[in-house]
Amino acid sequence: MAANQRIAVGVVAAACAVSLAACGSGTHAVREGTSGPQKGAPAAPAPKSVLRLIGDGSTAYTGTQPHLPRPERLKPGQKPPQFVVFSWDGAGEDSQKLFSHFRKVAKENNANMTFFLSGVYLLPEDKRDLYKPPQHSPGSSDIGFNDQQGISDTAKQARLAWLEGNEIGTHFNGHFCGPDGGVGTWSVDEWKSEITQAKQFVENWKTNSGMKNAAPLPFDYDKELIGGRTPCLEGQKNFVQAARQLGFRYDSSGVDNQLWPKKKNGLWDLSMQLVPFPGHNFEELTMDYNYMINQSGTKTQGDPDKFGEWGDQVRDSLLQGFDRAYDGNRAPLVIGNHFESWNGGTYMHAVEDVVKKVCGKPEVRCVSFHQLADWLDAQDPKTLERLRSLKVGEAPKQGWASYLSGHPAPAPKGVPGAPAVKG
């Protein structure tokens, strides 16, 4: 690392303080639309005062992420916690200020969340040709690009979100869907290009935007980025192959039932799930867009007289899914959303209500995908296999203590609960 890429801690602290001053918001940045330690395992120690700039200084290594719980292996007979993941596709800060709002919601409810950042939200309009999307001309994007204010605001929120224990994943870049060059038609190599570019736009946002004096994002994105969700849930097959080769650990691009996760092609499959849908004889996917389609069709602003009814329906749907798992097999509940104002903000209000109702309950942990993947990796594979044998909503008939009372294999070295290493 060159000498001019190392900054004294005091200088960095001052720069960060200045950069975190309140900002206005752009108006077109995002069309798609802090927490303390989690309950349960103790959080990792506070990171040392260290900062090492990476590349052009858009990102930096600052030590271990604050407020990141240490994953603990279940003890024999121990009832698993109820995990809930709230995740956001295309996370960015625009005039609606929903990124900053849900950071606050998370912090107030002892929750962490996953924010899937779209790389083009850190790329200015006048540099759009730097993006070379597969099967499209350079500078193409179905969700546009950003302006200076939007980039500044989005970087600020991503910075604060990570420092509060939340995860910064990826929703990739141009959000192309459908049969004409959409992500579902991309090859493995084309997916590799898209993933690499998403990283590059985050890792070079200061150079691309000209904001060279701004504070860096406080993480190494090459290491931080371990998962994402594909646009429109398309292209999962080839994406997973590319993602595995590039070091990802999970994917959340599918549709699943409320069962315990398993690995598919080397990645944890942490898909959204089907939950009861009040008033209907079918189940609905835990995502705002899908609820909207079943309420107002393709109209993002339907009948205002139904907003309250629709919001109650979504809230009750998610809560019924939560209760079914909480009182049943304890499968993690995965909820997906966009930062949007569809149907008068109906879905934002419903999700916020769910956060407030469930995250304070006993044995509930509202976590990021990163934290959930860490916990799953720490478990005995035989225990996870046993958990996966439970059906949707099925609690062990003989009780958890009996159901998980087997003798698990030794925990991996370094995982809390592992036997001490003899010298």
Image: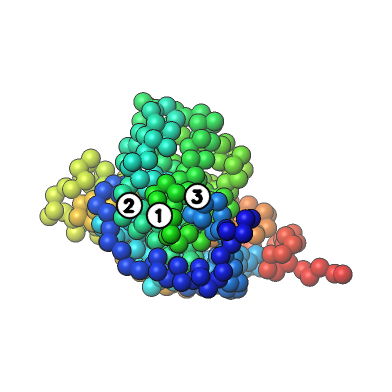
Mark 2: few/some/many CA within 10 Å (<14, 14-19, 20+):
some
Task: Kindly identify which numbered label has been placed on residue 148.
Answer: 2
- Measured Cα–Cα span from mark 3 to mark 2: 16 Å
Nearer to me, 11 or 159: 11
Q: Amino acid at mark 3?
A: Glu
Of labels 1 and 3, the one closer to you: 1
Left or right: 406, with 114 as reference point: right
Q: Residue at x 18, y 48 (%)?
A: 301
Q: Amino acid at mark 1?
A: Met
Nearer to me, 286 or 69: 69
- Measured Cα–Cα span from mark 1 to mark 2: 8 Å
Screen quadrant of the C terminus: bottom right
Q: Is residue 176 above or below residue 253?
A: above
Secondary-structure class at tag 1: loop
Screen quadrant of the N terminus: bottom right
Earlier along the polypeptide chain: callout 1 or callout 3? 3
Mark 3: few/some/many CA within 10 Å (<14, 14-19, 20+):
many
Q: Are marks 1 and 2 in contact (CB under 8 Å)?
A: yes
Residue at label 3? Answer: 203
Measured as percent of width and height from the top left, residue 324 is found at 43, 59
Measured as percent of width and height from the top left, residue 288 is found at 32, 50
Residue at label 1? Answer: 211
Earlier along the polypeptide chain: callout 3 or callout 2? 2
Q: Amino acid at mark 2?
A: Gln
Earlier along the polypeptide chain: callout 1 or callout 2? 2
Q: How is the image coloured?
A: rainbow
Mark 1: few/some/many CA within 10 Å (<14, 14-19, 20+):
some
